[in-house]
Image: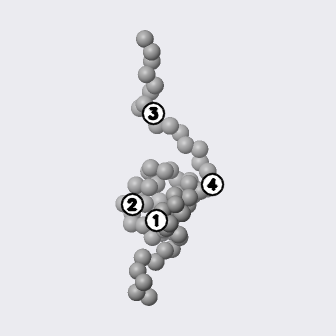
């Protein structure tokens, strides 16, 4: 009989770079709170990881969403 791996314990992530707070991440990329929390929960607090994610999504910091200016 083989033992199944314990799937109840989440895998630990290595923190790369300094951690963001959810509020700081949301402000930097002009995200609503719900989307910022979803990404933060999925990818962790690492500023390096979140910055890479947003670069891959082509969302630079402070991106203007309208061209009304």
Q: Is residue 43 above or below residue 61?
A: above
| Residue at the spot of label 3 | 9
| 63 over 53 or under it: above or below | below
C-alpha gap between disc 3 and disc 4: 24 Å
User: What residue is drawn where x is 61% and y is 51%?
Assistant: 16
Q: Earlier in the sequence, mark 2 or mark 1?
A: 1
Q: Where is residue 3 in the image (x, y as percent from the top left)?
A: 45, 18
- Image quarter of residue 31: bottom left
Which residue appears at 40% of the width and 55% of the height? 38
Question: Where is residue 27 drawn, in percent x and y?
Answer: 48, 69
Q: Identify the mark at residue 35; answer none if there is no mark.
A: 2
Callout 3: SS: loop
State which quarter of the image contains the N terminus. Answer: top left
| Residue located beneath label 4 in the image | 17
- The answer to which of marks 2 and 4 sits earlier in the sequence is 4
Q: Which mark is residue 26?
A: 1
Q: Is residue 25 visible?
A: no
Q: What element carries label 1?
A: helix
User: Would you say the residues marked 1 and 4 are in contact, meaning their CB atoms lie under 8 Å apart?
Assistant: no
How packed mark 2 is, by other alpha carbons closer than 10 Å (few <14, some 14-19, many 20 or more), is: few
């Amino acid at each position: 009989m083989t033992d199944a791996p314990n799937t109840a314990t989440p895998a630990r992530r290595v923190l790369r770079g300094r951690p963001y707070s959810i509020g700081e991440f949301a402000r930097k990329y002009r995200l609503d709170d719900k989307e910022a929390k979803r990404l933060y929960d999925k990818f962790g607090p690492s500023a390096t990881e979140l910055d890479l994610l947003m670069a891959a999504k082509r969302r630079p910091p402070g991106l203007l969403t309208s061209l009304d200016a």
